[in-house]
Amino acid sequence: MPAPYKITVENAGEATCYENERVLVALERAQGFGRLKNLPRKLPVGCRRGGCGVCRARVLSGNYRTDPMSRAHVSEADEAVGLVLSCAIYALGDLSLRLEAPQPHKQTPNIT
Amino acid sequence: MALTGVLRPGFVQVRVLDMQAAIDHYTKRIGLHEVMTGEDGRVYLKSGDEFDHHSVILRKADHAGSDLMSFKVASEADLDSFEKRIVAYGYPVDHVPAGEQPGIGRRIGFTTASGHRFELYAHAEFSEPKPLIHNPDVWSVEPHGMGARRFDHALFYGPNVDENLDFFEKVLDFRCAERLDTPDGLLAIWLSCGMKAHDVAFVKHPEPSKTHHVSFELESWADVGHAADIITCYDISRDVGPTRHGITRGQTIYFFDPSGNRNEVFAGGYTYYPDSPTRTWDHTEIGKAIFYYERQLNEAFLSVVT
Ligand code: FES
Ligand SMILES: [Fe+2]
């Protein structure tokens, strides 16, 4: 199937993802165009390079390839069940995914 | 003599997921030079404007972040006296033999209350390229990429920032150039061991031993703009800027290396004298303190670390 691919974000909307494009970057663009209306919170965007872990997601269906992902955020067992850092995966077809809640200790401290 | 004891930041050891991508980023883009690869695979880098053997070490690992930051002290005797003072404060000190990193003498290491490893050392060999010292032209090798002139400082995230402040002031003779207070207490400190506005900084964070950014100094605001062009042209992930920090007044851009570690390149900032009073900020102006033009924090500032 040729790109662009359709990324469906569970309960939120759809994004268009181009060949060799990081899935998170496709989601950022879709959010900018108002296509991810029903996200429970702002799309979490951090390093976009698989290091910080804020973009954790679960792939529900579809094929993709991955860049290295920090093992502090995605273990081998996680990866085996489709848990990924969405900035470090590239769609190889249409994908459907669920954004994961941030891990408890990753939450932003309240400073106001 | 103006500077005694702890002179300045020495080196930082950064964990990377893909070594070749990291080497390309830090050399071709940031503008450092590759000095050598060690027997254990660690890669040693420096700016052409630094004399000492290296200022950045890349270590391949399965997760991002940094292993340690070091400071250079003026003499071997300082190493011994700092060891006594650190132990007296209650922190264990370990010893790293000369040569564990090529070109670097013996080191002493300890862990702060924020969970970060720091090391002190007194001796470093020179390596090429380095600044000229006789009838010196402005450089021995033409700058490239962003033209980083030195590894300048790092910002770390972790708990017990109050204790870090006490330790760095009482034991290592740093001074607090700026601090940020909130109704919940001290949120962040910017510490100087010399005459720069900061050499290391800490922000309060629930998880210990986190790294927010590793920073490189550029010559001018125009160079920060050039760095921004490089960031877009080579599809480097940008975080924020070009902008200015209210704190330290540095003109800055934040971006990420290929492993997701945040980098900063910056120019300017004021001169800090040892008799300068501490500048203070409170929670009502926290946006301006961190990002002077945006006047608000971006979501990533407090939550995205490695
Ligand atoms: S945004 Fe940092 S790991 Fe994806
Ligand atoms: Fe900085």
Image (cartoon, coloured by chain):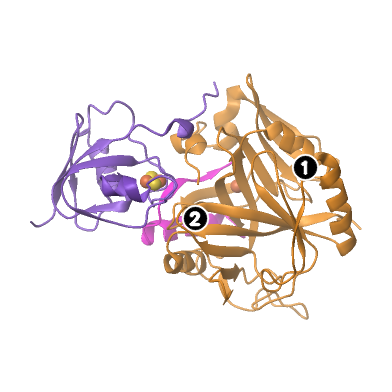
- Dot 2, how many residues are within 10 Å of its Cα: few (below 14), some (14-19), or many (20+)? some
Magenta span contains residue B235: yes
Mark 2 lies on residue: B225
User: Looking at the colours in the rendered structure, which chain would you say is drawn in purple?
Assistant: A
Same-chain check, marks 1 and 2: yes
User: Looking at the colours in the rendered structure, which chain would you say is drawn in orange?
Assistant: B
Circle 1: element type: helix
Question: In which quadrant of the rendered view does residue B13 lie?
Answer: bottom right
- At which x and y percent is residue B49? 66, 69
In the depicted structure, whether residue B289 falls above or below residue A21: above
Question: In which quadrant of the rendered view does residue B11 lie?
Answer: bottom right
Q: Is residue B3 left or right of residue B304?
A: right
In the depicted structure, whether residue B260 falls above or below residue A38: below
Q: Is residue B15 left or right of residue B158?
A: left
| Marks 1,2: beta carbons within 8 A | no
Mark 1 lies on residue: B168
Question: In which quadrant of the rendered view does residue B163 lie?
Answer: top right
